[in-house]
Image: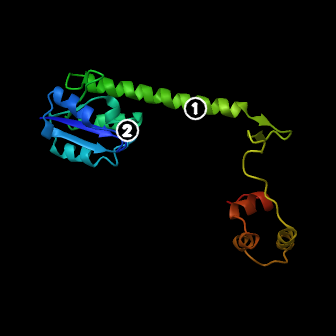
Amino acid sequence: MIYGYARISTKEQSLARQKKILIENGVKKENIFEETASGKDFKSRVAYFRMLENCRVGDTIVFTSIDRFSRNTAETIKELENLEKRGINVKFINEKIDTSFKGISQLLINIFSWYAEQEREKIRERQRQGYNSLQKDSKGRLIGKNGKVLGKPALKLNRNQLDLVNQYKNGKLDISKTDLAKLLGISRSALYKKVLNESSK
């Protein structure tokens, strides 16, 4: 059986052109599943999953183009692998790709996997460049574009808090460290590392 799938992202767009192309490529009108849904993942694809419920081993799903299938590389790989395991073929008209031909499905997955890795590497490289472009102050701390020091601000205690800490250190405050942290209004890790200068272990 040959099924067709047409997807638009917003109600302002039209499905008419996709449906026309699918019919011209051998998909019967009654076998076309259509919906308005995001292309970033498959979670909201009600019609898509309803179509999959009808699919059997050897069936083919036709899309006008890859971006009607998915716009997310990672999701594309994941769903292609899922369809391959189920023995369902995929055809992308614009790209002239038909996974019913031996080895095409795995080749397509490998290509998208390579592309996804290139995308990740570009993101990492942009992050590295952004990090390296940041200036540092006299203490070696990174300064953001807004001129502020990046990272968590140094812990500052007021006079009353310092008095509580001194009482605790001098044995005049008989409470647990957990209770001391609560009194100071800070976390236990901050108490250990920044106030008492000791390990929390």
The label shown at residue 14 is none
The structure residue drawn at horizontal position 84% and vertical position 69%, both measured from the top left corner, is 169
Q: Quadrant of the N terminus?
A: top left
Q: Amino acid at mark 2?
A: Glu
Query: For residue 104, which quarter of the picture?
Result: top left
The residue closer to the viewer here, 62 or 123, is: 62
Dividing the picture into quarters, in which one does residue 166 lie? Answer: bottom right
Q: Identify which residue, 148 or 115, lies in the foreground.
A: 148
Q: Amino acid at mark 1?
A: Arg
Q: What residue do we see at 53% from left, 28% from top?
A: 121
N-term-proximal mark, 1 vs 2: 2
| Residue beneath disc 2 | 75
**Whether residue 193 is situated above or below residue 79 in the rendered picture:** below
The mark total stands at 2
Q: Is residue 77 left or right of residue 54?
A: right
Residue 67 at least partly seen: yes
Q: Label 1: few (<14), some or many (≥20) within 10 Å?
A: few
Let me know if residue 197 appears in the view.
no
Q: Distance of mark 1 from mark 2, alpha carbons?
A: 20 Å
The quarter of the picture where the C terminus appears is bottom right
Q: Is residue 158 left or right of residue 133?
A: right
Q: Position of residue 64 (x, y in %)?
A: 27, 29
Looking at the rendered structure, the secondary structure element under dot 1 is: helix
Looking at the picture, how far across and down is residue 173, in whole percent?
A: 81, 77
What is the image's colouring?
rainbow
What residue is shown at x 84% (from left), y 41% (from top)?
A: 139
Mark 2: give few (<14), some (14-19) or many (20+) Cα within 10 Å.
Answer: some
Placement of 86 over or under 114, stated as above or below: below
Residue 192, given in percent of the width and then of the height, sits at 74, 61
Q: Which residue is mark 1?
A: 124
